[in-house]
Image (cartoon, helix red, strand yellow):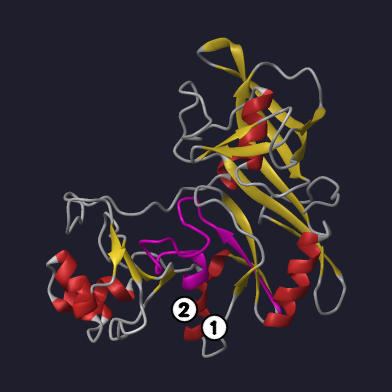
Amino acid sequence: MNLDDLEKIFDSPRPAPRPERPFQPFPEPYLAGPVPDHLRNATVARLAALLTRLSEAEAAALVEFGSVWLDDRPCLNPDQPLVEARHFRLNPPAYGPVKFYEADPARIVYEDADLLVYNKESGRPSQAVPHDAYNNVLSALGRLLAGRGGASSLWLSHRLDADTSGLLLLARNKEAAGRLGLAFQRGQVAKEYLALGLGPEPDRAAFTVDAPIAKEGGRYLVRPGGPGLAARTDFSVLDRAPHPGRDDLTWVLFLAAPRTGRTHQIRLHLAWAGWPIAGDPFYGRREAPAPRLMLASAALGFRHPRTGADLRITLPGLGPMASFGSSS
């Protein structure tokens, strides 16, 4: 695995469309508040229509799209009565209730009666977000399976950031979901990622970052002395190349094996170690422009939840990865 393989590893992203005029039916980024007493006998679509000044049909489309939440849960039924609801929130997507994403069958890397592994595109969330319950991998794969005439139920066994691409593991029944969940909790699932970082010339072939991660003011950061949640990532250098415009910077392709599962863990640990990932809008460098976040889930190792057989799954075309260790 080297820098010549970048196009295989980090394929083109699938971002949301950029409309000429953002869909914004009210001036605030979202609307929230208690359900008015005089609307207790009305439907969710009626509430959305009154608040947004959209037609009832347009408001119903917004509800079905997943942009309306009641009591901190998404409501997809525009005809649901508001009798028992206490609180609402409307989260309009800037692109409007536009259905633009479907799962690509060619990106299914592994599938059997219990499991499905999908090569997720960068730019697509793993699951529904507050303003859009349609254009995500979990929903799209459910539609794909339903179109085949089979059961469409799926459970995410782990999650990838929207901008991270690569292998996403899903269970196809509750039994498999429960066993995989326990395996992740017990550190019995190995995960390996490929990341392109920019920083000084590495002086080691491998190193470990063992530093807690904390959330402060809505932002995640590394706190070497704590307080924070314990986080550990093992890194190996796979390849390197000089930066064409800076003698003091080097492009480095890393294999990252997270031993814990904290939010933004690899991104934070690489940035803290001195090699922020190219294309990272939060922790990256302006000297490292990229069309996407250059981070991909490249390999998974675990025991099959039903048969117990060892499974080693890698991104197509990459061949065998480094040795697996345990990670959560």
126 drawn magenta:
yes
**Along the viewing direction, whichever of 242 and 324 lies nearer the viewer:** 324
Residue ID for mark 2: 143
Mark 1: amino acid: Ser
Residue at image location 74% in from the left, 41% down from the top: 231
Q: Residue 77 at x, y = what percent? A: 34, 82
Pointer 1 with pointer 2, Cβ within 8 A: yes
Residue 240, image quadrant: top right
* Label 2 secondary element: helix
In the displayed orientation, state which residue is furthest to the front. 37
- Say if residue 1 shows up in the picture: no
Taking the spot 17% from the left edge, 56% from the top edge, the residue there is 26
Q: Main secondary structure of the magenta part?
A: loop
- In front here: 238 or 132? 132
**Left or right position of 113 against 24:** right
Q: Is residue 186 left or right of residue 71?
A: right
Question: What's the magenta region?
Answer: 113-140
User: What is the C-alpha distance between the residues marked 1 and 2?
Assistant: 7 Å
Position of residue 64 measured from the top left corner of the image (x, y, whole percent): 32, 76
Query: The residue under label 2 is which amino acid type?
Result: Arg
265 to the left or right of 136? right
Q: Is residue 314 left or right of residue 70?
A: right
Decide which of tag 1 and tag 2 comes sooner along the chain.
2
Rendered image quadrant of residue 49: bottom left
For mark 1, give the secondary structure: loop
Residue nearest the observer in this picture, 118 or 82: 82
Read off the residue under disc 1.
Answer: 152
Name the spot of residue 10 as percent of width and height, x first: 56, 44
49, above or below 302, in the image: below
| Quadrant including the C terminus | bottom right
Q: Residue furthest top?
A: 247
